[in-house]
């Protein structure tokens, strides 16, 4: 998931470059519609943010389910060190 999020952040990380290539210089003003290109950039950013948010929420949901299951198992087996370690790892992930 971390790698997927890193790839999805590319547009945010390159926003200055995106703005520089989206907003036309004086010599290109007549050839490019700045309003349309800015709108497309905005829609691209919003789409990326929406997808990223959905992935993050899905990850949180899945990890929370795993934590709940591990807590239930922990109640049954108090002395299981491996189970405790896995539970801590999943809690940290959330």
Image (cartoon, grey):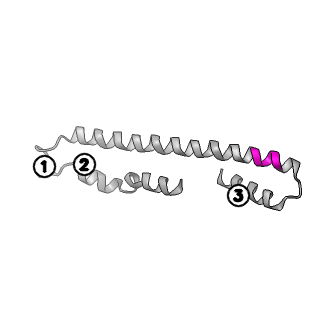
Name the one closer to the observer, 13 or 7: 7
Q: CA distance from mark 3 to mark 2?
A: 43 Å
| 5 sits to left or right of 62 | left
Residue 40 picture location, percent across and down: 29, 40
Q: Residue at x 79, y 61 (%)?
A: 82
Q: CA distance from mark 3 to mark 1?
A: 54 Å
Residue 15 picture location, percent across and down: 35, 53
Q: Which residue is mark 3?
A: 89
Q: Which mark is residue 22?
A: 2
> Considering only order in the chain, which callout, 2 or 1, is on the residue closer to the N terminus?
2
Q: Which mark is residue 79?
A: none
Name the one closer to the observer, 21 or 50: 50
Q: Which residue is mark 1?
A: 28
Count the marks: 3
> Considering only order in the chain, which callout, 2 or 3, is on the residue closer to the N terminus?
2
Please name the predominant secondary structure of the magenta segment in the image: helix
Q: Secondary structure at mark 2?
A: helix
Camera-nearest label, 3 or 1? 3
Residue 79 picture location, percent across and down: 89, 58
Q: Residue at x 79, y 47 (%)?
A: 71
Q: Bounds of the magenta span?
A: 69-73
């Amino acid at each position: 998931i971390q790698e997927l999020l890193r790839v999805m952040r590319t547009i945010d990380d390159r926003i200055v470059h995106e703005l520089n290539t989206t907003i036309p210089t004086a010599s290109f003003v007549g050839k490019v519609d700045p309003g349309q290109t800015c709108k497309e950039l905005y829609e691209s950013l919003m789409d990326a943010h929406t997808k990223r948010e959905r992935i993050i929420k899905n990850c949180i949901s899945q990890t929370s389910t795993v934590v709940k299951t591990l807590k239930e198992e922990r109640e049954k087996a108090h002395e299981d060190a491996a189970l405790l370690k896995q539970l801590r790892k999943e809690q940290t992930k959330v």
